[in-house]
Image (cartoon, helix red, strand yellow):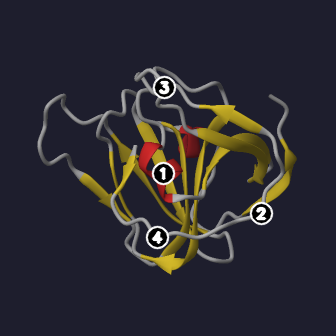
Amino acid sequence: LFLLAVFPFFVCLPPAVVEAETGAVGDTVVFEKRQLRIGGKIITVEIADTPSKQARGLMFRKSLPKDHGMLFVFESERELSFWMKNTLIPLSIGFFDKERKLLEVQEMSPAIAGELYPRTYKSSKPAMYALEMEKGWFSRNGIKEGATFSFVGAAKQ
């Protein structure tokens, strides 16, 4: 997934990492992994907290393991905008405010190959975090607006 509005910042996280499949030789982006608690569920997320990680996102992935996703972390709240260029799997995206409270969920479909201007998915309110999960994950797990997440520790690889 490609992030349209990216700003540099740094977030301290434990050293658990994963190398993302990129589809290009020598073009690997390394993501830290963390566990989150949201709505009584524990999930594993890869952290996209730099412009290069945010630009790579979940591009070129053919699948996501059960209860795994990607958390985009920003320095401050702002309107966030995402597109699905080179993203092969349908996703749900939840936008969260600075208090880690869920503002909204949108369902996203992969862009059509070769499409010059893929559809964008924008937060309707300023958000500081965006959580991408397998399409339908939020509704299947009863995660609704107002739910909050918290970090519970580093995930095992």
- Nearer mark to the viewer, of 1 and 3: 3
Q: Give the mark nearest the N terminus, 1 or 4.
A: 4
Instruction: Quickly name the residue at label 1.
Output: 52
Instruction: Quickly name the residue at label 3.
Output: 26
Left or right of 126? Residue 112 is: left
What is the x, y in percent for residue 33? 73, 42
Kind of residue sitting beneath label 4: Phe
In 3D space, how far apart are the residues under numbered discs 1 and 4 (Cα atoms)?
Answer: 10 Å
Instruction: Quickly name the residue at label 2.
Output: 12
Q: Give the mark nearest the N terminus, 1 or 3.
A: 3
Kind of residue sitting beneath label 3: Gly
Label 4, residues with CA under 10 Å away: few <14, some 14-19, many ≥20 = few
Image quarter where the C terminus lies is top right
Kind of residue sitting beneath label 1: Ser
Tell me the element at label 2.
loop
Instruction: Quickly name the residue at label 4.
Output: 7
Contact flag, marks 1 and 3 (Cβ < 8 Å): no
Number of numbered discs: 4
Q: What's the residue at 58%, 38% (across, down)?
A: 140
Contact flag, marks 1 and 4 (Cβ < 8 Å): no
Contact flag, marks 3 and 4 (Cβ < 8 Å): no
Tell me the element at label 3.
loop
Q: Foreground residue, 106 or 24?
A: 24
